[in-house]
Image (cartoon, rainbow, N blue to C red):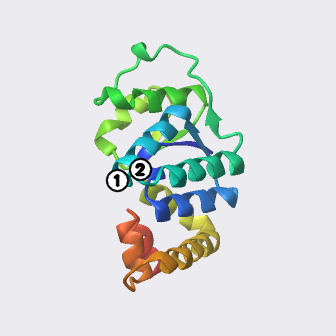
Amino acid sequence: MKIIFDTCVLYPTVLREILLGVAEMGLYKPVWSTRILDEWTHAFRKKNSSGQDTILAQIALLNFHWPNSLVQDYDLDVRSLWLPDENDIHVLASAISSDAEAILTLNRKDFPKKILKDFGIVRYSPDEMLRGLWIDNSEIISKVVINAFELAKQNMESKLTLKAVLKKSYLPGLGKLMA
């Protein structure tokens, strides 16, 4: 299954590490566009004015590890598309152009299922998708989540539990499954 990542699922580090870790295990293929990466860069710089090198390194690593995941251009006229937030139309265009089956986003209202259905695309939140994959792949997902948690613990100031880290990473349902 090919899934386009909206910017909002790339920005949180632990969430991104889990999603990419599961993809590395072959459970789906992630895709994104240059504009999505540009939005991620912009959002990161707004919160971390001195983090230019950090975000550029993260994007370079992303492109290195996933060289076939970048959607180069949309092969359709985006003016023919409509979403409630016109700033998200490029995500839909990228999904259509890359033949993605789903859009992975935290912004449910901006990607109505009825509109996406016309293009044969579904919308998932990261929690929905991972809980769906859990049924047949719980060992794989558990291993990826534990690895991401162990990495995150090195950078955490407080001693958060796995369940708390998953909740903070927009994965409360997965946290309940793993508890």
Residue under circle 2? 44
Residue at 66% across / 45% down in the picture?
Answer: 63
For residue 159, which quarter of the picture? bottom left
Residue under circle 1? 47
Q: Is residue 60 visible?
A: yes
User: Alpha-carbon neighbours of circle 2 within 10 Å: few (<14), some, or many (≥20)?
Assistant: some
Q: Residue furthest bottom?
A: 159
**Horizontal side, residue 62 vs residue 41: left or right:** right
Residue at 40% across / 14% down in the picture?
Answer: 79
Q: Quadrant of the C terminus?
A: bottom left
Type of amino acid at the residue the image marks with label 2? Phe
Q: Which mark is residue 83?
A: none
* Residue 113 x %, y %: 37, 37
Type of amino acid at the residue the image marks with label 1? Lys
Residue at 44% across / 69% down in the picture?
Answer: 174
* Residue 26 x %, y %: 70, 56
Q: Nearer the viewer, residue 168 or 127?
A: 168
| Residue contact at pointers 1 and 2, CB within 8 angstroms | yes
The span from disc 1 to disc 2 (Cα, nearest Å) is 5 Å
User: Alpha-carbon neighbours of circle 1 within 10 Å: few (<14), some, or many (≥20)?
Assistant: few
Q: Is residue 123 visible?
A: no
